[in-house]
Amino acid sequence: MTTARPVCQRPLFQILFGLLMFAVYLGSQFSSVWVLQHVMSDADFAALIQGYGFAVLLAPSLVLMLAGFWAWQRWFSRQPTLVGHFTRGDVMRGIGLVLLVQGLATAVSVWLDMTPEAFMTSLYDGKSLLQSIVMVICVLIWAPIIEELAFRHFLMPRIDDQSSGLRGALLIMFSALCFAGLHMFQYHHLLTFAALLGWGLVLGYCRWRTRGLLLPMLLHALISSIGLIGALF
């Protein structure tokens, strides 16, 4: 005699919860800004966003995504674990693919003599040393945690059930397209979209292969560090 699976552990409810948490992620990206706009003067709000915009934008998302992952582990599934299972070869392969995408994007940019993205060239403008340190912490630590939970977990919560084949590839492609598309609110070049899509595919593949979130988070931090260093020059 088999025991019925709890309702919350059924695939449909896992998918619905994942989509709900992804919607929460999207909403949280703007809710704090909307609230502050209505409780602060225009000058104070502008100064806050200029100095600590990343922290204002990401803090609610970080809390909500971690709470959602805790709820997922407690009521929905023990998969994925945070660390997963990866080898030194997985790490080197991931780093190599990330750098390959970066190298190709850089080569095409130089070949076409493209102007840098305005968002990146103004990243440090008007910030004090403390504000720059806070921004770096947000970009290198907070953002990888938030976005890997949102895009590589909640947006494709059943990826661990795809042992191989077309369905797994489609889930990874869907996540990568959303990852690239939503980031284009900050950027303008088609080449940037292509690079983000490539990185999204790499991160999705590593998420599927390792059955965990740590390696995608670390690779995401590597991608962000490349951008932060490039914005200095």
Image (cartoon, rainbow, N blue to C red):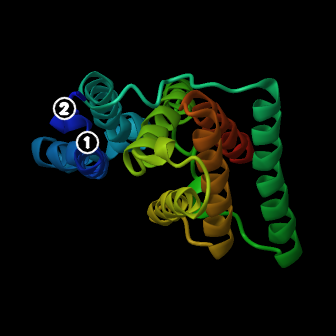
Task: Name the residue that disc number 1 marks.
Answer: 10
Nearest the camera: 68 or 48? Answer: 68
Can residue 121 be seen in this snapshot? no
Nearest the camera: 58 or 206? Answer: 206
- Say which amino acid is labelled 2: Pro
Nearest the camera: 218 or 44? Answer: 218
Q: Residue 192 appears at what percent x and percent y?
A: 64, 65
Q: Is residue 171 above or below residue 77?
A: below
Q: Report the residue at 58% width, 64% height from top.
A: 166
User: Do the residues bearing badges 1 and 2 touch, measured as CB atoms within 8 Å?
Assistant: yes
Local secondary structure at mark 2: loop
Instruction: State which quarter of the image contains the N terminus.
Output: top left
Q: Report the residue at 30% width, 52% height from top.
A: 26
- Local crowd at mark 2 within 10 Å, few (<14), some, or many (≥20)? few
- Local crowd at mark 1 within 10 Å, few (<14), some, or many (≥20)? few
Examine the image and state in which quarter residue 195 appears: bottom right
Task: Name the residue that disc number 2 marks.
Answer: 6
